[in-house]
Image: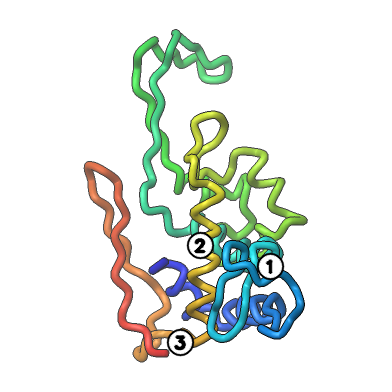
């Protein structure tokens, strides 16, 4: 959530697009649609239903792009269940050997991402996203049978939180104009820790 707020603040055009999309999905409290509290959420003085949440394509893309650039855990690993020799390099991975790889290296690869150092949410719009997700080039929640079980729930919670925040607040860049974050890497666990300056809104 910290990274999302940071990207909203330093990408005001994107923040406006997110806000506009959220507002188009609101409906008046006097609407005749289902107002069952089990299927709607009140944000401000508006009702927001789960169907509306699913239509927030740009917000979903914004969150995915934030995930791509701001991993909170970079290193992933597996244990080989049998000997394996790579045909290209000739390297053999022995059974029971632990293998670790960097998710951020994949997420910053020009093989998969055009201008990977730039914040471009449009790359994750529905018309483009399948090229990245289906190829395994987006590993925030892992891939395949062992992927994180919260891969649908977590983005939903973030969408609701962002919608709630943007109804009442606008996030602006730090007062000194800083638009970068200093990343510090834990040498053992590879956790990324960042502390941007205060935001004013």
Mark 2 or mark 1, which has the lower sequence index?
1
Q: Residue at x 62, y 63 (%)?
A: 39
Q: Residue at x 31, y 65 (%)?
A: 194
Tell me how far mark 2 sits from mark 3, CA to CA: 17 Å
State the image quarter where residue 38 is shown.
Answer: bottom right
Percent position (x, y) of residue 116? Answer: 56, 57
In the drawing, does residue 115 fall left or right of residue 92?
right
Quadrant containing the N terminus in the rendered view: bottom left
Circles 2 and 1: CB distance less than 8 Å? no
Percent position (x, y) of residue 95? Answer: 39, 10
Q: Please tell me how crowded label 2 is: few (under 14), some (14-19), or many (20+) other residues with Cα within 10 Å.
A: many
Q: Please tell me how crowded label 3 is: few (under 14), some (14-19), or many (20+) other residues with Cα within 10 Å.
A: many
In the drawing, does residue 91 fall left or right of residue 183?
right
Asked if 181 appears above or below 133 in the picture, the reply is below
Asked if 63 appears above or below 44 in the picture, the reply is above
What is the number of the mark on residue 172? Answer: 3
Mark 3 or mark 1, which has the lower sequence index?
1
Find disc 1 in the rendering and name its residue: 52
Along the line of sight, the residue nearer the viewer: 126 or 156: 156
Secondary element type, mark 1: helix
Quadrant containing the C terminus in the rendered view: bottom left
Tell me how far mark 2 sits from mark 1, CA to CA: 21 Å
Q: Residue at x 60, y 60 (%)?
A: 115
Circles 3 and 1: CB distance less than 8 Å? no
Secondary element type, mark 3: loop
Find disc 2 in the rendering and name its residue: 66
Along the line of sight, the residue nearer the viewer: 53 or 68: 53
Percent position (x, y) of residue 180? Answer: 40, 73
Q: Residue at x 30, y 50 (%)?
A: 191
Along the line of sight, the residue nearer the viewer: 72 or 42: 42
Tell me how far mark 3 sits from mark 1, CA to CA: 26 Å
């Amino acid at each position: 959530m910290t990274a999302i707020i940071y990207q909203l603040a330093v990408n005001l055009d994107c923040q406006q697009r997110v806000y506009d999309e959220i507002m188009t999905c609101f409906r008046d409290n006097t609407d005749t649609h289902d107002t069952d509290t089990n299927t709607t959420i009140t944000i401000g003085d508006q009702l927001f239903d789960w169907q509306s949440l699913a239509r927030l394509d740009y917000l979903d893309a914004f969150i995915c792009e934030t995930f791509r650039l701001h991993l909170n855990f970079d290193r992933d690993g597996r244990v080989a269940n049998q000997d394996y020799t790579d045909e290209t390099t000739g390297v053999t991975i022995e059974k029971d050997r632990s293998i670790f790889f960097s998710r951020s290296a994949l997420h910053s690869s020009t093989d998969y991402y055009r201008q990977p150092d730039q914040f471009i949410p449009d790359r994750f719009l529905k018309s483009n996203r399948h090229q990245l997700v289906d190829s395994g080039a987006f590993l925030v929640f892992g891939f395949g049978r062992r992927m994180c079980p919260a891969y649908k729930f977590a983005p939903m919670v973030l969408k609701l939180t962002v919608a709630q925040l943007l109804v009442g607040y606008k996030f602006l860049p730090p007062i000194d104009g800083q638009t970068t974050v200093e990343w510090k890497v834990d040498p053992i666990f590879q956790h990324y820790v960042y502390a941007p300056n205060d935001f004013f809104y």
